[in-house]
Image (tube, grey):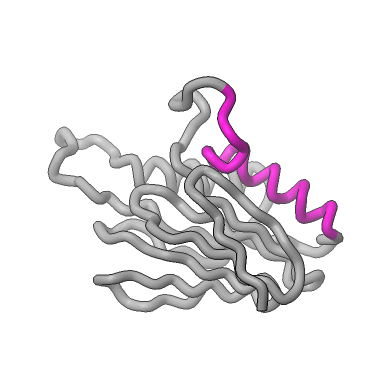
Amino acid sequence: MTQKAVGIADLAVGAGDLTLYTVGLGSCVAIALHDAECRVGGLAHVLLPHVALTVGVPKAGKVPGLAVPEMVSRMRALGATGEIQARLVGGASMFASLLSHGAASLGVRNVQAARAACAAADLPVVGEDVGGDYGRSVYFDVRTGRVDVKTVRGPHVVL
């Protein structure tokens, strides 16, 4: 099986016998998109909730509102014709004690933006492992759609 790493503020798509993975998710969110019928998938490691928080022209993988449509477009170019489903991982509140009372953490805002981007693209979110105060790594099997979430402190989760 081929493996491809997805860095921070980046994305990748592929088909068949491929594992896309990203490590070190804290407040960032991994968005895994999968077409089970055609065995095509994409993975983004988004850093910020909105383009307004970036400087200059952001890479497509930096924010959910750019990452989701870009992945869908690339997946369609690779032959995805079926329903595309989404899974979300990450969005931890790594430094909650530093927030002012009532303020939403960057992780919470990233998860909200990822959900909104999926909704805007009519993609159902069929699995989530979000929140908490610990980091995660994601391993996404494009052939099967299985998303393995590994952490140092939390439980091993399969979406």
The residue at the far top in this view is: 56
Q: Start and end of the magenta stretch?
A: 57-78
Tell whether 120 sits left or right of 106: right
Q: Residue at x 77, y 47 (%)?
A: 73
Q: Nearer the viewer, residue 18 or 53?
A: 18
Residue 145 position in % (x across, y down): 64, 73
Residue 71 inside the magenta-drawn segment? yes
Instruction: Name the dominant secondary structure of the magenta segment.
Output: helix
Residue 127 position in % (x across, y down): 52, 67
How many numbered marks does the figure carry?
Answer: 0
Residue 70 position in % (x across, y down): 70, 43
Tell whether 129 sits left or right of 140: left
Q: Residue at x 27, y 50 (%)?
A: 93
Q: Height in image: 34 above or below 45?
A: below
Q: Height in image: 14 above or below 48?
A: below
Q: Residue at x 19, y 46 (%)?
A: 96
Residue 124 position in % (x across, y down): 62, 58
